[in-house]
Image (tube, grey):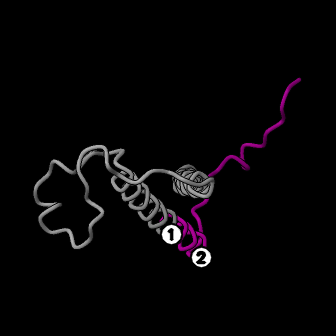
Amino acid sequence: MPCNIDSNSMTAEPFSFGVRLGLVFIVQTASLSAIAVLALLLYLAVNFNLIPLHSVNFISQYSTTATWKGKGEGRNVSSHMHYYLLNLLVSDLVQATGGILQAIVSV
């Protein structure tokens, strides 16, 4: 089936100032959201000893809490709420990545 496309409709017009400003805000907020979620996921990974940083001396030296324990003595996941929180954080990370990619593709 042939497709009738007018050559005039294929011309690219630049976005107005308001549209460009909206795209900048979308990318900024999505980037900040992705950075915040990655920081929280990294904190949880270190706190639950998924990333063993206990061998690094400066962390235990400057730590003000008693959460830095020896090898294998980290906190454990004791509730379904922990899994729910991780699911929400990963979902937010996927959504932030989608927001960044949407703005890149639309330009």
Report the disc number at residue 18.
2
Up-down relation of residue 49 to residue 33 (above or below): above
Q: Secondary structure at mark 1?
A: helix
Residue visible at 54% across and 53% down in the picture: 78
Task: Return the disc, 2 or 1, that comes first in the chain's sequence.
Answer: 2
Q: Is residue 93 visible?
A: yes
Left or right of 23, for residue 55 = left
| Pointer 1 local density, CA inside 10 Å: few below 14, some 14–19, many at least 20 | some
Left or right of 85, for residue 53 = left
Mark count: 2
Residue visible at 59% across and 55% down in the picture: 79
Residue under pointer 1? 29
Extreme-top residue of the structure? 1
Nearer to us in this view, 40 or 69: 69
Q: Which amino acid lies under the numbered mark 2 shown in the image of this protein?
A: Gly
Highlighted magenta segment, given as a residue range: 1-27
Residue visible at 58% across and 72% down in the picture: 22
* Front: mark 2 or 1: 1
Residue 98 horizontal/vertical position (percent): 58, 52
Q: Is residue 106 visible?
A: no
| Pointer 2 local density, CA inside 10 Å: few below 14, some 14–19, many at least 20 | few
Extreme-right residue of the structure? 1
Residue visible at 14% across and 69% down in the picture: 62
Cα distance in 3D space between marks 2 and 1: 16 Å
Q: Which amino acid lies under the numbered mark 1 shown in the image of this protein?
A: Thr
